Image (cartoon, grey):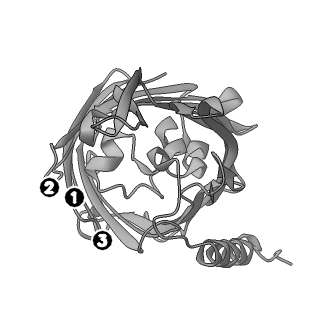
């Protein structure tokens, strides 16, 4: 007698539970560590951030750690860099190690660093201008994560991240109390799944990112930007050109429910020719200053270079660059 497949109902239950957690903890504009909400990978952001069901690269740790499970190479390295709005510099890397062809799963390391630039510090004073200049501050943030992804069957994969996150916002000179260091840190967790239906290339996935306890600098507590996402992807050529082996047109759709803002959708497309050249376009809804994303990538001999472009309204456009290597 064939054993029933319990993976699908178990996944459905987990999705419902996590949706309840996210819905119950909605705090619009009341979360901190917002740098964790900024997409890192050039390929993903060119596709509008729709990356929940995109697998096979170490950069999946920034979107859905279950994507680690289908990495085929023994090592996969990704380096990302871009300047965000207000000259905020982001740099990140992800590294995946796949021992014994995934028999024991795929292990990952991710690092994200943020430099907010130099900010002139001031304190309240009773002089004519009402303040005094203090030292120049250089706020920074850092995330170090350890990920794991595993195929539980040919169709179903799971993954998770444990992340140490810290943010340093400089020093404060408090009259009567001295100097206060504005430094906090916390452990956060990500979890995700991807399920291949067996119908053509159709896959469904979900992820929960930035789950942690409440933290605070002084009196008022805040939480990390928890976000729940669910989505699907498919190669559109499977339905019209199913014998086309050297080209693909991957369409990806995500729906997100974040703690700190309204719900949104991500939609992206990637045309790939012979695993050598890719063109990408994407869209993110419910954002004030940005929506569209564009980009391309080239790859050869295990080396891949990606570029992503995001117009950002009244701010300068964001140009993302990624270099990836796998062997």
Residue at image position (42%, 25%) is 138
Quadrant of res 22: bottom right
Could you say where residue 219 lies in the image, as x and y percent from the top left? 66, 54
Could you say where residue 267 lies in the image, as x and y percent from the top left? 30, 65
Residue at image position (45%, 44%) is 35
Which numbered disc, 2 or 1, marks the residue that appears first in the sequence?
1
Q: Looking at the image, can residue 99 be seen? A: yes
Q: CA distance from mark 3 to mark 1?
A: 9 Å
Q: Is residue 26 above or below residue 102?
A: below
Q: CA distance from mark 2 to mark 3?
A: 14 Å
Of the pair 87 and 170, the residue shown nearer to us: 170
Local crowd at mark 3 within 10 Å, few (<14), some, or many (≥20)? few
Q: Which residue is mark 1?
A: 290
Q: Secondary structure at mark 3?
A: loop
For the N terminus, which image quadrant? bottom right
Q: CA distance from mark 2 to mark 1?
A: 6 Å
Could you say where residue 153 lies in the image, as x and y percent from the top left? 69, 57
Q: Which mark is residue 212?
A: none
**CB under 8 Å between discs 3 and 1:** no
Q: Which mark is residue 313?
A: 2
**CB under 8 Å between discs 2 and 1:** yes
Q: Secondary structure at mark 2?
A: loop
Q: How many discs appear?
A: 3
Q: Which residue is mark 3?
A: 286
Of the pair 4 and 277, the residue shown nearer to us: 277
Of the pair 183 and 12, the residue shown nearer to us: 183
């Amino acid at each position: 007698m064939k054993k029933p497949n319990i993976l699908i109902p178990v996944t459905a239950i987990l999705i419902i539970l996590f949706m309840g957690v996210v819905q119950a903890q909605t705090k619009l504009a009341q979360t901190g560590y917002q740098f964790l909400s900024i997409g890192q990978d050039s390929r993903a952001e060119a596709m509008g951030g729709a990356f929940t069901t995109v697998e096979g690269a170490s950069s999946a740790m920034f979107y859905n750690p279950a994507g680690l499970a289908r990495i085929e190479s023994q090592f996969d390295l990704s380096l990302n860099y871009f300047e965000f709005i207000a000259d905020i510099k982001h740099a990140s890397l992800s590294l995946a190690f796949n021992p014994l062809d995934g028999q024991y799963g795929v292990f990952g390391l991710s690092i994200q660093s943020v430099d907010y630039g130099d900010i002139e510090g001031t304190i309240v004073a009773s002089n004519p201008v009402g303040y005094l200049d203090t030292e120049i501050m250089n706020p920074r943030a850092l995330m170090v994560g350890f990920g794991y992804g595993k195929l539980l069957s040919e169709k179903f994969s799971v993954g998770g991240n444990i992340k140490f996150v810290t943010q340093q916002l400089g020093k404060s000179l408090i009259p009567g109390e001295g100097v206060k260091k504005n430094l906090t840190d916390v452990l956060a967790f990500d979890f995700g799944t991807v399920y291949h239906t067996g119908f053509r290339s159709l896959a469904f996935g979900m992820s929960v990112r930035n789950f942690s306890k409440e933290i605070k600098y002084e009196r008022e507590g805040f939480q990390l930007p928890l976000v729940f996402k669910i989505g699907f992807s498919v190669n559109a050529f499977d339905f019209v050109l199913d014998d086309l082996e050297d080209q693909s047109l991957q369409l990806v759709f995500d729906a997100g429910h974040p703690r700190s803002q309204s719900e949104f959708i991500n939609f992206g497309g990637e045309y790939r020719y012979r695993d050598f050249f890719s063109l990408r376009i994407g869209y993110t809804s419910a954002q004030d200053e940005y929506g569209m994303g564009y980009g391309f990538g080239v790859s050869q001999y295990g080396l891949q270079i990606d570029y992503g472009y995001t117009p950002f309204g009244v701010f300068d456009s964001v140009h993302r660059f990624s270099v990836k290597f796998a062997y």
